[in-house]
Image (spheres, rainbow, N blue to C red):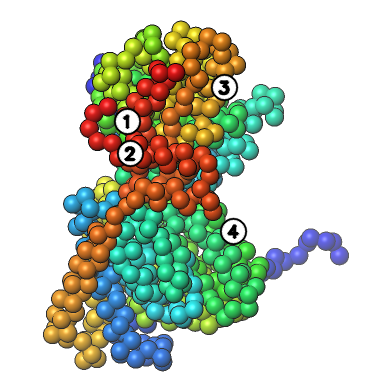
Amino acid sequence: MMLANMVTAINNALELLLRENEEVVLLGEDIGKDGGVFRVTEGLFDKFGERRVIDTPLAESGIIGTAIGMALSGLRPIPEIQFAGFMYLGFSQLVNHAARYRSRTRATRTVPMVVRTPVSGGVRSLEHHSESPEALYSHAGGLVVLEPSNPYDAKGLLIKAGRGGDPVLFLEPTRLYRLFKQEIPEEAYEVPIGKANILSEGEDLTIITYGTMIPVVKDVVEKRKLSAEVVDLRTINPLDNETIVESAKKTGRVLVVHEAPRSFGVGAEVAAVIAEEAMFELQAPVIRVGAPSMPYPFPGYEKYYVPNEKKISDAVSRLLSL
Amino acid sequence: MLLGVGVLGSAYKGEIKYLQIIDESGNADDSLFPRDLADPKVIEMYKAMMLARAIDTKILSLQRQGRTATYAPGLGEEAVQIGSAMAMRKEDIFVPAFRQGGVYLVRGLPMEVLLLYWMGYEEGNIIPKEVNGFPMAVPVSTQMPHSAGIAFAQMYKSRDVAVVSYVGDGGTSEGDFYEALNFAGVWKAPLVAIIQNNQWAISVPRSKQSAARTLAQKAIAAGINAVQVDGNDVVAVYSAVRDAIENSKKGPTLIECVTYRIGMHTTSDDPTKYRSDSEVEEWKGKDPILRIKAYLSKRGAWDDTKEKALVEEQAKTVDDMVEKAEAFKPDPKNIFEHVYGSVSETLKKEMNEAEASYFWQGEI
Ligand SMILES: Cc1ncc(C[n+]2csc(CCOP(=O)(O)OP(=O)(O)O)c2C)c(N)n1
Ligand SMILES: [Mg+2]
């Protein structure tokens, strides 16, 4: 076992993937000598050399587009986009190509690629450094979207994704990078894609959440001594409908919590799935907690934007009173 | 005669000129020195460069005390910012990236507004009209197509206005950069695009950014004028930008200013991980401020007494900036009110919820 925070867990997963398969290459801005702006690729340049850990020119469409080309030619690229806000410059490559290659060639050509990028805010970053774009990419279809909330899942999901055959967006919440450490296996292991994780069992309500909101939700549950079933989605797309619906049927009250804006978000999808599959077993309507429906503000205002314990707790009270 | 057989001719041959007017020891080439540039104006340039550096130094120390968010200093790159801004006419419009604090300064932005930006408030993006400039653009190079569009609009409205935009050496690798130059070239728009080539894009050196020998030559593909300038020579920058602005009625120019990022990329960066101290020391020897000071001193236009008075005066200006900026009180309503032309029902509801939860303190 090794004691790891999310940064070291991801670093370790990348190292194991590079070791086990010569076809794995890393590319991105500042990932080589500098070890990445969050130090996630630290040491890999020294261990594997510039042929496999590639510092690219500053161009996101170029990074994702060339990675697609590599993936189409038998390599397994793991590009890093420095911040999710800059992935928009490569949006066309992701949505027009990565998402569709398999289907439009009837699976004769595939794009086994994992695009890693830091997401979400709460760490006083400048403009465009705190995006939570998971719904945008999930909506496209054809892209697997993962968002771990702890070191164990981060390593296992990344290894699973790196060995798979689909284009994957691997979203890394910056706020959780160094928040806590966990004992995780030293060797390679996989966490299944498409399977949510029930963090705690409960009877009175279900809280479905992921990413940066996990620690905040946990605090609310602990402080209020709630009997809550807390579900960490881990995979945003494809959504684990089964776990969601089962828990909704069990508790009859569901809160969905994410940092991304509430409108048109993952919460809307979860609520819709529950409405379609478990409507008559609910005691109350599904309630969503998310950021206000606007772009992420400047850091001086983020405390008025990112959902906090109070906002979640108020929503819990409302849900339980209905 | 068989088609396609023959001697290869030359389809195109390009050349990029290099401009330096004041050398590293402060000696000017009189044949190149702009005639409109008398000592008082050069002194003004020197003072602005000194103030830009004083502001950088101050904000860096504020950042270390947690009084600003991340900061991107322009240390060592003052000549590009000040020379180009001084070359603009009042009516010319500038479109910055994020390392052009000195440009804002020369154009008259109250410095506390700039500081508000780095303290993390959108109010730092409220640029008074008379400054004729736009807010910073963090997504690299995305401002470049805007600048071509802004230049088109000037042409469209028959205004004698040039648009001066800024991008880093790293920024020239983005598609937006090429697209902007290409559009401006096709439209013959009055654009002066300045590459502030400070040799580094965070940890990626200029040599890994492009196989091209100069970045200026990227203009050739767009069919527009280009020149490479010693970016630590404020007079050369001034001269090149002024000429390009004069020519802008005929079409765009790309100006590569060769300078050096003396400091860290931002306060989150540790440059010792990827570059050598000796490289930094070498460039410190080419300091743009020392160079113009040497020039002025040689002419008897500057001395230690003047220097001392300037430093004291600027320290006051900088303290004043901090005091004004830190007096700002953010109101959370500010983030809700301007998302759309009118506040949507959804946002109204969310604003009320925000009041309930975000001002809460203590236990749940
Ligand atoms: C589109 C985009 N990608 C990545 C980043 C992260 N980033 C910020 S500045 C920077 C390097 C910019 O280098 P350069 O254009 O040379 O400007 P400099 O910082 O040297 O002034 C990077 C990679 C960004 N802001 N925008
Ligand atoms: Mg640069």
Q: How far, Cα to Cα, is label 2 from label 4?
A: 43 Å
Residue A278 position in % (x across, y down): 55, 12
In screen coordinates, is B60 left or right of A41?
left
Marks 3 and 1 in Cβ contact (< 8 Å): no
Mark 3: give few (<14), some (14-19) or many (20+) Cα within 10 Å: some
Give the chain of mark 1: A
Q: Position of residue B1 (x, y in %)?
A: 86, 65
Nearest to the observer: residue B351 or residue B198:
B351
Q: Secondary structure at mark 3?
A: helix
Q: Nearer the viewer, mark 3 or mark 2?
A: 2
Depth order, front residue of B200/B45? B45
Question: Which mark identifies residue B358?
Answer: 2
Query: Distance between the Cα atoms at labels 4 and 1?
Result: 47 Å
Horizontal relation, residue A198 to residue B299: left or right: right
Q: Do we see residue B171 in this rendering?
A: yes
The answer to whether B121 appears left or right of B215 in the picture is left
Identify the amino acid type marked 2. Answer: Tyr
Indicate the position of residue A181 as horizontal and vertical percent values.
25, 24
Kindly identify which residue carries mark 3. Answer: A272
Kindly state the secondary structure of the residue where label 2 is placed.
helix
Q: Earlier in the sequence, mark 3 or mark 1?
A: 3
Identified by mark 1, the residue type is Lys
Q: Are marks 3 and 4 in contact (CB under 8 Å)?
A: no
- The answer to whether one can see residue A4 in this image is no
Q: Chain of mark 4?
A: B
Q: CA distance from mark 1 to mark 2?
A: 8 Å
Q: How far apart are the two marked residues, 3 and 4, measured between alpha carbons?
A: 42 Å
Mark 1 vs 2: CB contact within 8 A: yes
The residue that label 1 is drawn on is: A310
Which label number is shown at residue B179?
A: 4
Identity, as a three-letter code, of the amino acid under mark 3: Ala
Disc 4 secondary structure class: helix
